[in-house]
Image (spheres, grey):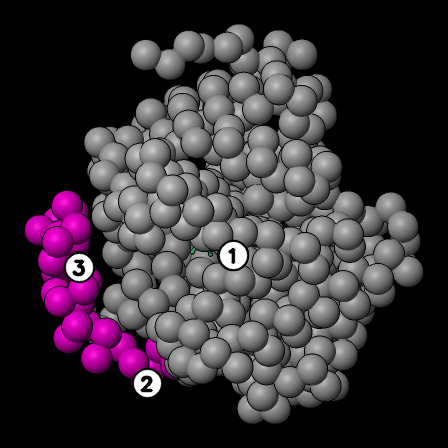
């Protein structure tokens, strides 16, 4: 049995949820939406091969085998329904919200700035502030304007200045309604999936392109952070780092060394380059990995709809390790699970809160928790069947329904905010 600390969070703690433009807004035109149309049929055809062993398969297979699942299309139509969605944040007593600005909307052609789209995001951020909800804005969350990828995207160092210019310009536009900024979401995940494994656009599989993208994204963060600080030093800038917790499953020398090496490549390879250019550390936590020899095998009691092993309490060790190494305040920028039936979300959240509290009791400076996700959304190469939302979305009617865990979490947040 896990001992339960008393939950006591700082007065200014940010309680919220996270999204990314392409996953919720609908009708985006970027490198990813182009790729979806080219690949939807083959993805649907391969679904059974990839997913028939996940526990949710019988429930989700109809959707997973349909090509429309792999096209973001209208997604959750958040671009038009954001006020309704902000109402939901308030229903859950949240005071923070993470979203991304879709670069392809504000600069659809190189150098051509779309004033309507800019105005949209200005109104959007202002509306959050008006409601007492702190915006946390992401500038690159896996999607890019087509013109930028035609030039070679982040594979080319000489393209980075385009991203820096976009970053500087949009932050000037958003002005004082914004304080917390994530330049790049999970740079190492993007580089790995898109340039090493070849799962995501542009489906490359070379060591050299992976290495270049990884380094260029670190460089892009550094340059964008400098440009943003140049506007105003009060902006708090970071990347969102996906962190897993690796630990040896037995006492063997090889298991211990492998866990250590894997942890290094997961976290430190990127963070060593960017941490000194961060005001805080954005942390995304989903997984822990138990290492036997040089293999990962993490049989947890519970798994998500995607088959991911669930170890929410280990967030404590992730936070403690990052604190000890980088000495930065942290905000959890993503954390959650695919759970369409809402069987495990409340348990997950409970374990996570306990883990966060223990880390804080041990000296970690934690400033916020943003759950992934507010809404069911378009989960990249897997499409719409994985359900990460505190809020269920019916994609036919766009009706939103708070899941029971969301109602429960809203009460907990109220209690924790009042307790201070
Ligand atoms: C993270 C991504 C986020 C979402 C979750 C499930 O790696 O940043 O957009 O897809 O995984």
**Residue 220: which numbered mark, if any?**
none
* Residue 119 visible to the viewer: no
Identified at 26% across, 50% down, the residue is 306
Tell me which corner region of the image, top left, top right, bottom left or bottom right, holds residue 71: bottom left
Mark 2 and mark 3: span between their CA atoms?
21 Å
Confirm if mark 1 falls within 8 A of ligand 1: no
Identified at 42% across, 69% down, the residue is 193
SS under mark 3 = helix
Q: Position of residue 292 (x, y in %)?
A: 29, 44
| Nearer-N-terminus badge (2/1) | 2
Pick the residue in front: 39 or 271: 271
- Quadrant (top left/top right/bottom left/bottom right) for the C terminus: top right
Q: Which residues are magenta?
A: 35-64
Relative side of 333 to 277, left or right: left
Magenta stretch containing residue 420, yes or no?
Answer: no
Residue that numbered label 3 is attached to = 51
Residue that numbered label 2 is attached to = 38
SS under mark 2 = helix
> Mark 2, mark 3: which one is toward the viewer?
3
Q: Position of residue 379 (x, y in %)?
A: 37, 59
Few, some or many residues within 10 Å of mark 1 (<14, 14–19, 20+): few
- Magenta segment, prevailing SS (helix, strand or loop): helix
Relative side of 80 to 311, left or right: right
| Nearer-N-terminus badge (1/3) | 3
> Mark 1, mark 3: which one is toward the viewer?
1
| Nearer-N-terminus badge (2/3) | 2
Pick the residue in front: 397 or 355: 355
Mark 2 and mark 1: span between their CA atoms?
32 Å
User: Does residue 35 lie above or below 341 as drawn?
Assistant: below
Residue that numbered label 1 is attached to = 265
Q: Position of residue 65 (x, y in %)?
A: 15, 67
């Amino acid at each position: 049995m896990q001992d339960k600390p008393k939950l006591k969070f700082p007065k200014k703690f940010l309680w919220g949820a996270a999204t990314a433009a392409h996953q919720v807004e609908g009708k985006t035109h970027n490198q990813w939406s182009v790729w979806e149309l080219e690949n939807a049929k083959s993805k649907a055809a391969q679904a059974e091969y990839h997913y028939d062993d996940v526990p949710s398969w019988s429930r989700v297979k109809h959707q997973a085998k349909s090509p429309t699942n792999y096209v973001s299309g209208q997604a959750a139509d958040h671009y038009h329904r954001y006020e309704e969605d902000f109402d939901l944040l308030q229903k859950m007593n949240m005071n923070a919200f993470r979203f991304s600005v879709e670069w392809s909307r504000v600069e659809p052609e190189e150098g051509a700035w779309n004033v309507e789209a800019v105005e949209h995001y200005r109104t959007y951020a202002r509306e959050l502030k008006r409601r007492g909800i702190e915006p946390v804005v992401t500038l690159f969350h896996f999607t890019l304007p087509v013109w930028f990828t035609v030039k070679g995207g982040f594979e080319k160092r000489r393209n980075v200045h385009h991203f820096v210019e976009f970053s500087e310009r949009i932050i000037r536009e958003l002005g004082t309604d914004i304080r917390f900024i994530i330049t790049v979401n999970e740079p190492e995940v993007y580089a790995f999936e898109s340039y090493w494994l070849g799962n995501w656009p542009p489906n490359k599989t070379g060591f050299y392109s992976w290495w270049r993208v990884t380094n260029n994204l670190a460089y892009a963060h550094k340059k964008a952070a400098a440009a943003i600080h140049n506007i105003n030093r009060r902006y708090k800038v970071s990347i969102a780092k996906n962190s897993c917790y690796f630990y040896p499953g037995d006492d063997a020398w090889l298991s211990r060394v492998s866990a250590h090496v894997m942890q290094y490549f997961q976290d430190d390879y990127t963070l060593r380059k960017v941490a000194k250019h961060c005001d805080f550390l954005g942390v995304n936590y989903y997984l822990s990995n138990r290492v036997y020899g040089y293999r990962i095998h993490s049989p947890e009691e519970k798994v998500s709809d995607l088959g991911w092993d669930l170890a929410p309490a280990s967030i404590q060790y992730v936070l403690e390790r990052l604190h000890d190494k980088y000495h930065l305040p942290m905000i959890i920028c993503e954390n959650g699970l695919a759970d369409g039936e809402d069987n495990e979300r409340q348990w997950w959240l409970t374990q996570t809160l306990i883990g966060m509290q223990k880390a804080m009791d041990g000296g970690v400076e934690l400033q916020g928790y943003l759950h992934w996700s507010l809404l069911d959304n378009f989960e990249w190469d897997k499409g719409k069947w994985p359900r990460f939302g505190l809020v269920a979305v019916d994609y036919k009617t766009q009706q939103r329904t708070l899941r029971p865990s969301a109602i429960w979490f809203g009460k907990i947040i109220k209690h924790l905010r009042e307790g201070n």
